[in-house]
Image (tube, coloured by chain):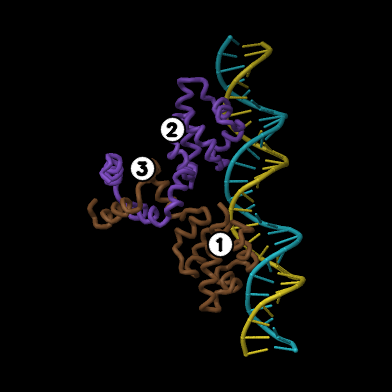
Chain colours: A brown, B purple, C cyan, D yellow
DNA sequence: CCATATGTGTAGCATATAGTACACATTACA
DNA sequence: TGTAATGTGTACTATATGCTACACATATGG
């Protein structure tokens, strides 16, 4: 559990920086709305907390998936949480049941749900 | 945003207390491992924070479902969170897709998963 | 070359979360 | 009727979470 979030965003940012000078740590921090020193600490794992709101802005800036970046920083999107909290027993059971299924099988459910088979 | 958690556990506790004197606020608090004054504040909505660990013990004491009590206090079980965080994109999509499905339809998925149809 | 931008160090701060300790007035009941 | 149990008020406390402000040395490119 070392510093997945930090190293992940650092790598992504540096990759983007290679082709676009607007991806300096300072400029990204400014766009996200946090102090450069704070982003620096996050990237290096010296600090681990970043709010959901800022993570979402950062994800957009880096062209990353919201849910993935949130997960890397130990969070789950508020909208997902609310969905579960509205029907906790139902969703808890479903999630625990699906827990060990391979991605493929889960995706099949997703697809069938999408296609209105339910 | 009123005091669902507090009034819910107060009602449940008083119901049990009617038939069993061991369900006084003080005795329940002692079994759960918190100060009676704290449980009092929780039941009356003067205080809203109770840790997942204590909520689980309280739920067991009151014969209530863990996930339901957790949800009422705005939480989601750590094990559920971890399941989602391990495959955030997959689970986020699934959850958002079935968000508006009626209980019955979700239950059908649960049952088919249970029966190994996947 | 030098002005500007860059990444980082140090020192704080505010709010949220999760409680304890104990006195007090009231209630219950042996 | 007195004593033990009950529910609650007041006053603290500790840690987690999420940040700011600003100085500093170094890098960079016009």
| SS at badge 2 | loop
Disc ID at residue A97: 3
Which residue is at a point 36% across and 42% down the rendered structure image?
A: A97
Asked if the residues shown at circle 3 and circle 1 are in contact, with their CB atoms under 8 angstroms apart, the answer is no
Q: Whole-percent x and y of residue C2?
A: 74, 87
Q: Compared to A55, does B91 lie above or below? A: above
Which residue is at a point 58% across and 37% down the rendered structure image?
A: B41
Q: Compared to A66, does C24 lie above or below? A: above
Specify whether disc 3 shares its chain with disc 1: yes
Pointer 1 residue: A7
Pointer 2 residue: B64
| SS at badge 1 | helix
Q: Chain of mark 3?
A: A
The single residue placed furthest to the left in the displayed view is A117
Q: Whole-percent x and y of residue A52?
A: 52, 58
Q: CA distance from mark 3 to mark 1?
A: 32 Å
Q: Nearer the viewer, mark 3 or mark 1?
A: 1
Which residue is at a point 47% across and 47% down the rendered structure image?
A: B82
* B8 relative position to D27: left or right: left
Q: Going from the N terminus, do you reach mark 3 or mark 1 first? A: 1
Q: CA distance from mark 2 to mark 1?
A: 42 Å
Residue situated in front as seen by the camera: A101 or A48 = A101
| SS at badge 3 | helix
Q: Whole-percent x and y of residue B84?
A: 43, 50
């Amino acid at each position: 559990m070392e510093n997945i979030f930090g190293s992940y965003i650092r790598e992504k940012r540096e990759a983007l920086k290679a082709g676009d000078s607007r991806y300096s740590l300072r400029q990204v921090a400014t766009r996200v709305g946090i102090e450069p020193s704070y982003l620096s600490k996050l990237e290096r794992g010296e600090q681990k907390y970043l709010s959901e709101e800022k993570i979402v802005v950062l994800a957009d800036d880096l062209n990353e998936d919201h849910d993935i970046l949130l997960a890397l920083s130990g969070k789950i999107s508020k909208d997902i949480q609310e969905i579960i909290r509205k029907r906790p027993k139902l969703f808890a059971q479903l999630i625990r049941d699906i827990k060990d299924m391979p991605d493929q099988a889960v995706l099949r459910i997703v697809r069938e749900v999408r296609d209105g088979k339910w």
